[in-house]
Amino acid sequence: MPIVYPHKTPMPCRDPEERRQSWDEVAEGYTVERAIAEARRCLNCQDPVCEQGCPVNVPIRDFVRSVAVGDFQGAADTIRRRNLLPAICGRVCPVEHQCESCCVLLHHQDPVGIGRLERFVADWEREHGRGGEFAAPHGWRDQKVAIIGSGPAGLTAASDLAQLGYQVSIFEALHAFGGVLRYGIPQYRLPKEIVDDDIEHLKALGVEFVRDVIIGKTVTMDQLFDELGYSAVFVGTGAGSPIFMNLPGENLKGVYSANEFLTRVNLMRAFSFPEFDTPLRRPKRAAVIGAGDTAMDAVRCAIRLGAEEGHIVYRRSEVEKGARAEDYERAAGEGVIFDWLTLPQRFLGDEAGWVSGLECIRTELGEPDESGRRRPVPVPGSEFTIEADLVVIALGTNPNPLIPHTTSGLDIDRHGCIVADPQTGATSRQGVFAGGDIVTGAATVILAMGAGRKAANAIHEYLQQGVAEKDAPRNDVVAPAPPVAGEASGGASK
Amino acid sequence: MDTTARIIEKKDVTDVTKLFVVHAPLVARNAAPGQFVIVRVTETGERIPISITDFSRAEGTITLVVQQVGRTSALVNALRVGDVFLDFAGPLGAAVPLPEQGHVVLIGGGFGTGAVFPLARELRSRGVRVSSIIGARTRNLVILADLLATESDELHVCTDDGSFGYHGFVTGRLEELLQAGAGFTHCFAVGPMPMMRAVANTTRRWGLPTMVSLDPLMVDGTGMCGGCRVSVGGESLFACVDGPFFDGLQVDFDEADDRLTTYKDQEQLACQRAGLGGK
């Protein structure tokens, strides 16, 4: 019987003052001792309900049990049966809304630190283990599958399909792979070396990575099927189109969408200008509109770019914020100022065309709106100004319109999302599957991975039907035993 | 999939303007007049948009005309025959909506002349009458006159200093032709922002439908960042996916011009560091 301590084992973090000037990772991760101590808090439930809170159903109880006894490679193998990107998920999953919200310890004490343990295991494997050795039977089937977009949905679908033996190509519009993991999530929260490593694993599986190709422009959907010989396509192009507020002054210099600001910082490394060529405004006082994960990323990047003050401006209250708990706390630790119940009304500018501030009005919360959250109602006469020389709009994104606009036969809903079966990702066009933010609107990395996995299984089923209809499996191909479908992500790591 | 984009021909158009023929069959395959590519030339480099001057699906080539205005364009212009672009993505942007009939006046200012050429070729293939007006500060900065002449029913060359052709701005010649009853039905103009603004101010008086190609700052070029947003008829649009051609009579040129100055200081610093005079 394990001794259960009431609180989560703390994870060491670097000092907040030091963090304000550094792009190094904030959270340092568990030591071996801390990981074992935390894993021993797990009750090893007969019915591990935590696993139901995970969109890809990682065998949480079993991997935590392995950690508790010091079998870290065993833990890594167990996680990889269901999740090929644990170093990423262990850092960016909103665990308090997922696995940890289901932990039976939640209502008696702190839940087990599942996210921290997942990260520990993935990092341990990177440093000590046989990461990357999970070879797979890629390419023994003669069918080709195209994956559009190299974000979390696409990477997951690619990995599952490659392990099922398909010839998989990932097409990426940008010059670097990873989608939001590359351009969106900052270095101090997700070091890019980790994304690089996971992509190298997929390359080792035989997945073809093609950059600078914009499907719908460089190559159309029809050309993928008719000229390039792909039998199925997975669309994981994400929610890439930034939402603006249509307020006066929005096009002043120094007003950025979160996408532009974060892309300049993360993908183009504008924080290293002039060593890197892409420039960015260096702020003194930054204001970020919104209170989700992206808003926290933007305001903490602004501080690291030298802003003496970084504000979060949000029309609702702290309770309704969308940001992950850990990152909210770390933002607060780095000195972010939170202007809750504050609604921007227009952008103010100076005579040279630069943004100089935000004119805002106070709000109070009224009755719940269609989202179930209490609606912010402006308080008459409460107008005031927040000075800012850099403003970032982080109010979410719409689905990327490139594929919907250039592809016939795809049903699109009124939000611009591709309509897809939630269980299979199947769209209205035969052979085309979709998942992640392009279907759901902006959501999380792990939900996109879950959708990528479901679609990979459905594509496998769809292509097998095709083979059955054409009957006669090819005998001239020497094939290793295919993995069991339900264990698709296991590969040789089982 | 082979995405290599290799330079197979390079010409000096002026001292600071080079013409490249790039073998990039994947990009040429679906290219259309009015589109652009995004290129990157070093691992630490920027992504910059460049208008497509010409394309051949048969040859698998894209032709670009690049004027050195800053550090990245200088790096591009230093590339040689046989070199490959680190990144060469496209074709991006919407194809320009061209008429099926009528008499089109094309206006190219400075290196913008390169970007009107594919319009001339497409219009002529549709049987549309094409009059081209191109301008430059002085004679040896006039570019692509011979090439454009092959796809124009008439070509008017203007120089600010009168060293060649019409003495004055393109708008002066345009006004003369309009007054002489040229019968233009559409105008397309590409060039520096002040030139396009002046063209729009002229054609507005004549009620001539006019499209201009905007060249704002861009990062991804696929509609993701919104950095290239421009106000057209009071609406904020993205030049990379909604453009680059917009209704010139409705563009907010003041705003578009001012947004171009966002990184003026950094651009100067980058040019100094690279040992370039810069602008």
Image: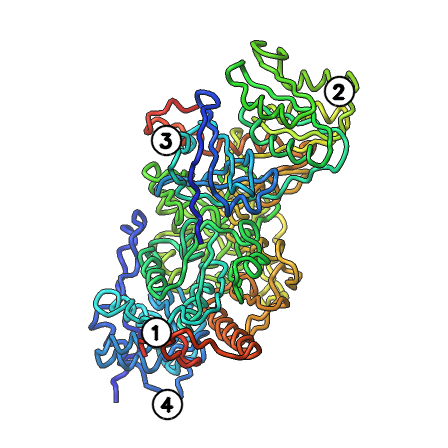
Q: CA distance from mark 2 to mark 3?
A: 44 Å
Callout 1 secondary element: helix
On the same chain, marks 3 and 4? The answer is no
What residue is disc 1 on? A80
Q: CA distance from mark 2 to mark 4?
A: 86 Å
Q: CA distance from mark 2 to mark 1?
A: 71 Å
Residue lying furthest front: A476
Q: CA distance from mark 1 to mark 3?
A: 45 Å
Callout 1 touching callout 3 (CB < 8 Å): no
Q: Amino acid at mark 4?
A: Gln
Give neighbour class at mark 4: few <14, some 14-19, many 20+ (Cα, 10 Å).
Answer: few
Q: Amino acid at mark 3?
A: Ala
Residue A307 occupies quadrant: top left
Callout 3 secondary element: helix
In what quadrant of the picture does the C terminus of chain A appear? bottom left
**Label for residue B270?**
3
On the same chain, marks 2 and 3? The answer is yes
x, y percentage for residue A291?
A: 48, 57
Give neighbour class at mark 3: few <14, some 14-19, many 20+ (Cα, 10 Å).
Answer: many
Name the chain letter of the residue that bears numbered label 3: B
Work out whether A323 lies above or below B54.
below
Callout 4 touching callout 1 (CB < 8 Å): no
Q: Residue at x 39, y 60 (%)?
A: A327
Work out whether B237 lies above or below A150.
above
